[in-house]
Image: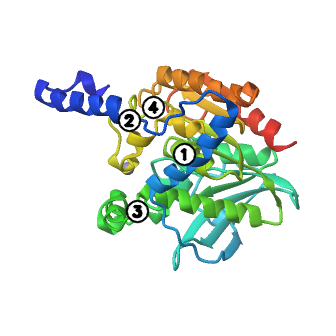
Amino acid sequence: MPLSSSLSPLNRDFRDYLLRRLETQGRRQRFRGESRDEFEVWQTQARETLARTLRMPDELDALELVREPVSTGAQPWDWGHMDDSVHVERLCYTTFPGVRASAFLLVPAGATANTPAMLCPPGHGRGMNQVLFEHGAYRHYPFELARRGFVAMVPEHLSFGERVPSHFGEHGYYTGVAQLLGFTMYGVYIRELMRAVDVLASLPETDATQIGCYGLSLGGSTTLLLSALDLRIRAVGISGFLTSFRSTFIDVGHCVCGNVQDLALEFEHIDIASLIAPRPLVVESGRGDTGFPVDAATATVAELKKRYALFDREDRLAHDVFDGGHEISGHMAYGWFDRWLKE
Ligand SMILES: [Zn+2]
């Protein structure tokens, strides 16, 4: 239910004040030009502003990577959706100085070199194990990608899954402490995902020039931000997220860990997504996804199409509006990545 329909009159006063602030001071970085040349200049400047706003930690350790095969018989999860066409590994790799991250890696059987790769960042929930093994919103999509011939990596975000500091209560602990120490947690997520791209690019099986990213919900927002900033991402799938700050975090109410200080003052979703153009992007919107309304997604995609038109590449933008909720569709996305990453 939108917040506006459940607020008392006194609370509505302040919400209306916030909306006036959004309307008068939001989207400082929006593109105001007309030509492709102006747009490309804008993209370079806007990327710098976005990176600065995210307040990412700068320092990364030298990359160290450990790969270990996962024995299906020794794991507690349901492997019923698996088959021998995909090998599963656990990865452990360095990110910030002294910090290790974990991930699952799915490798198509027989892959040896020049294999396209997909990064699959998890949403807000139970982390990489949920994405791979629970039945539900994710529909085991990394397995589907691997069956189709992609190396698929599912990294664990800090704050979720096996990287949640549960003895401090809940995942928001890191969000708060990051703010105390000069970061945003989204900045931490995106810097770690850039390192995950380093990992994918370093694998002997992969083609470092054919890496995509596809995620749902918080995984959709991290896909959006990573792809906006990191040009190594060559094809993009954003599911259950791309709409607007106005229609989601401001009008609906989400976990506070999704907010980045000042971000809506600088950018709307459309402005961040414009940094992906003209790289191929498929957007997924479930008609029943009340947290990320389909009407807002449709309006954003329509405006985004004008950016792709500057490059005469409207064919590189697709919108899968499907009968479903807050979940992966895949109806267009699987073919989309086949088309754009297997050239
Ligand atoms: Zn949260």
Provide the residue designation for mark 3: 183
| Mark 2 crowdedness (10 Å alpha carbons): few <14, some 14-19, many ≥20 | some
For the C terminus, the quadrant is top right
Instruction: Look at discs 1 and 3 and give the one toward the viewer.
Output: 1
Query: What's the CA distance linking mark 4 and mark 2?
Result: 12 Å
Scheme by which the image is coloured: rainbow
Secondary structure of residue under mark 1: helix
Q: Name the residue under label 4.
A: 244
**Label 4 vs 2, first from the N-terminus:** 2
What amino acid type is highlighted by mark number 2?
A: Gly
Residue under numbered circle 2: 26
Tell me if I can see residue 250 in this picture.
no
* Proximity of marks 3 and 4: CB atoms separated by less than 8 Å: no
What whole-number distance in Å separates the C-alpha atoms at marks 2 and 3? Answer: 21 Å
> Counting residues from the N terminus, which is met first, the one under dot 3 or under dot 4?
3
Q: Which is nearer the eye, 108 or 3?
A: 3
Residue 46: numbered disc: 1
**For the residue marked with disc 4, what is the amino acid?**
Ser
Looking at the rendered structure, the secondary structure element under dot 4 is loop
Check disc 2 and report its element: helix, strand or loop: loop
Q: Residue 159, relative to residue 3: is it above or below?
A: below
Q: Nearer the viewer, residue 173 or 33?
A: 33
Mark 1 neighbour density, 10 Å: few (under 14) some (14–19) many (20 or more)? many
271, 66: nearer the viewer: 271
Crowd band around label 3 with a 10 angstrom C-alpha radius: few (<14), some (14–19), many (20+): many
